[in-house]
Image (tube, rainbow, N blue to C red):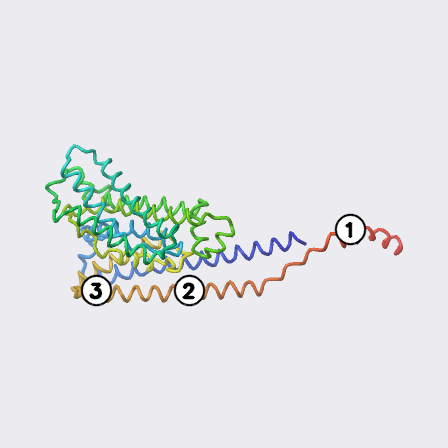
Amino acid sequence: MTATATAAETVRGRGGRRLVDRVARVRELGIVVALAVLFGVTGAVNPSFLSYASLRDILLNSAIIALLAVGQTLVVITRNVDLSVSSVVGLAAFGGALVLADNPGVPIPVVIAGCVLLGAVCGAVNGLLVGVAKVPALVATLGTLYAFRGIDYAWAGGRQVNAADMPEGFLALGTSSVLGVPLLALVALVVLLVVGWMLRNLRSGRELYAIGSNPEAAVLAGIRVRRRIVAAFVANGALAGLAGVMWAARFGTVDATVATGKELDVIAAVVVGGVAIFGGSGTVYGAALGALLLSSITSALAVLRVDALAQTAINGALLIAAIVLDRVLALRVAAALRRRSREAPPPVPRPAPGKAAASTATEPASRGEAE
């Protein structure tokens, strides 16, 4: 009887997980359909939108935002947010470009590793503030957004690093292609696949979802919540540092204003991609698709000669629509799970040990009397 009850509970749990997974797939499929419609309509109006040069620019523009969206997803699914990513990108981009300009003999991989480490340190500062000091993530990362940008301005001192000051080998990273696909897009794709696999298959990845779903229950379940939150911020910072290197290689000209305001684009990509702003659900694949969709919309509006202010309004409307849709889907999933719980047969109570023993002892006697 106990085994039957346990099996029923397991089936209900699997059914709930399948329902949540199905909703996530629907969100990602919806983004793919929106991309297909966008490219089809814009390509019909202006065929140059579907040219190789245009598609290459879209991939390059979305690669950095997609990389940042992957890191932001790690933080958002724990029910937090990191507003400082744009400042970390700017700090890493200027720092890497300055080192390369002033020290031409420094190996490029060493500079890339240094920028990633710099981003990880910035992420650790955010993680300690949020995970250990218990400062609300919105407040903590808003403060570090300005603090890191201030460090960037002080470091730059009004200086600008131009493409002519940096090695050709480094700048080639931003222009090279492999089989026609930009190298930066391939880097973002590799990071996406690795992080997506880790979230789905590793215990540490699944624990991030548990923390976002119910932090108090995660503590009771023995999950090291503080450590996981700090690790999520560190990983996000490291990816922001890598994005800073990609930015410097992509654009060549770097100063203290690099990536200013891009944190809003990153958060918009994450939310549009189906990652719940309240934590606990979503995938890095959806976030990357959200980045690709927003970059494609921006390019399409430019091709269609839509006013820049109208582009901003459209992006804002998309963000609001994504948040509303996310909330509606979350309420529907919660209602469906409650319905399944009510419709499932109640577990059969386990008999007390004394009664079971008595029943077993009297069974042969009763059978003998009946015979």
Name above or below for residue 187 compared with residue 323: above
Callout 3 touching callout 2 (CB < 8 Å): no
Mark 3 falls on what kind of element?
helix
Q: In this view, does 120 lie to the left or right of 215?
A: left
**Closest to the observer, 29 or 243:** 243
Which residue ends up furthest to the left in the rendered image?
164
Q: How far apart are marks 1 and 2 (CA)?
A: 50 Å
Name above or below for residue 348 compared with residue 200: below
The residue that label 2 is drawn on is 329
Task: Tell me residue 205's x, y (percent).
Answer: 42, 47
The residue that label 3 is drawn on is 311
Mark 2 falls on what kind of element?
helix
Label at residue 357: 1
Task: Tell me residue 149's x, y (percent).
Answer: 22, 52
**Closest to the observer, 218 or 330:** 218
Amino acid type at image mark 2: Leu
Q: Residue at x 27, y 43 (%)?
A: 118
Residue 103 visible to an observer of this rendering: yes
Q: Nearer the viewer, mark 3 or mark 1?
A: 1
> Could you tell which of marks 3 and 1 lies nearer the N-terminus?
3
